[in-house]
Amino acid sequence: MKNQLTVQDIEAMQKEIDYRKLEVRPKALEDVKETRAQGDLSENFEYHAAKKFKNQNDSRIRYLEKMIKTAEVIQDTTPSDEVSVNKTVTIYIPEDKEEEIYTIVTTVREDSLKGLISVESPLGRALMHHKAGDKVTIFVNKDYSYVAEIRKIEDAGQAADVGLRSF
């Protein structure tokens, strides 16, 4: 299965790749070189830590490059007044008597602690293609659901800083 990514997702991934290749990698290689020169490698903690960091950085670069290479680029043709990818949605949950704000993103960018909700999550699926004023039922599982009212929809760029989650 291919990951569905927007053009913005791919641009953010490419920006991270460039940063990791041009800024992080040279520093990591220098750290490995410096710590290797300190002597006995079997007891050199700094060398092993530097090498581990370099390998993690290289692994992240490979992961991002593979994601871009195998991505299915999706276009958002949804009207501006409907919930879709890269929209920030304010909802009111009567059961809790509170408003919550979420940004709908592709799966690769989801981070519920930052309010980034995947289009494939129960909440994301329920909100998609609805308009302000609509009431939607969110089915969490077969035993629990709740109702939310969509209060406001705006472009994510206007409302929140959305980035890629780091692994």
Image (cartoon, grey):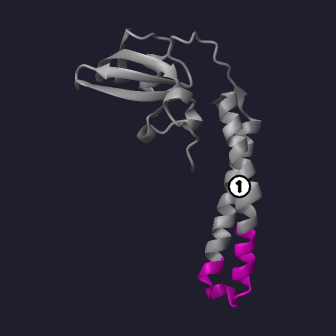
Q: Position of residue 156 (x, y in %)?
A: 53, 27
Label 1: which secondary element? helix
- Residue at 45% across / 10% down in the picture? 131
The quarter of the picture where residue 67 lies is top right
Q: Say whether residue 29 is left or right of residue 116.
A: right
- The answer to whether residue 33 is magenta is yes
In the foreground, 24 or 3: 24
User: In the rendered image, which quarter contains the N terminus?
Assistant: top right
Relative to 26, 164 lies left or right: left
Residue of label 1? 20
Residue 34 figure quarter: bottom right
Considering every residue shown, the one lying at the far front of the view is 158
Residue 2 visible, this orientation? no
The x and y percentages for residue 58 are: 71, 58
Give whichever of 79, 110 is nearer the camera.
Answer: 79
Amino acid bearing label 1 = Arg
Query: Toward the viewer: 21 or 1?
Result: 21
> Does the magenta run of residues contain 42?
yes
Residue 62 in the image, given as x and y percentages of width and height: 73, 50
Q: Quadrant of residue 4?
A: top right
Question: Majority secondary structure of the magenta segment?
Answer: helix
Q: Residue at x 51, y 11 (%)?
A: 81
Q: Position of residue 16 (x, y in %)?
A: 68, 47
Residue 28 shown left or right of residue 85 in the figure: right
Residue ID at (65%, 86%): 42
In this rendering, the count of numbered labels is: 1
> In the rendered image of this protein, does residue 84 appear above or below residue 33?
above
Position of residue 130 in the picture relative to residue 17 (left or right): left
Binning the other alpha carbons within 10 Å of mark 1 as few (below 14), some (14 to 19) or many (20 upward) gives some
Can see residue 133?
A: yes
Residue shown at 68%/41% (left/top)? 13
Q: Which residues are magenta?
A: 28-47
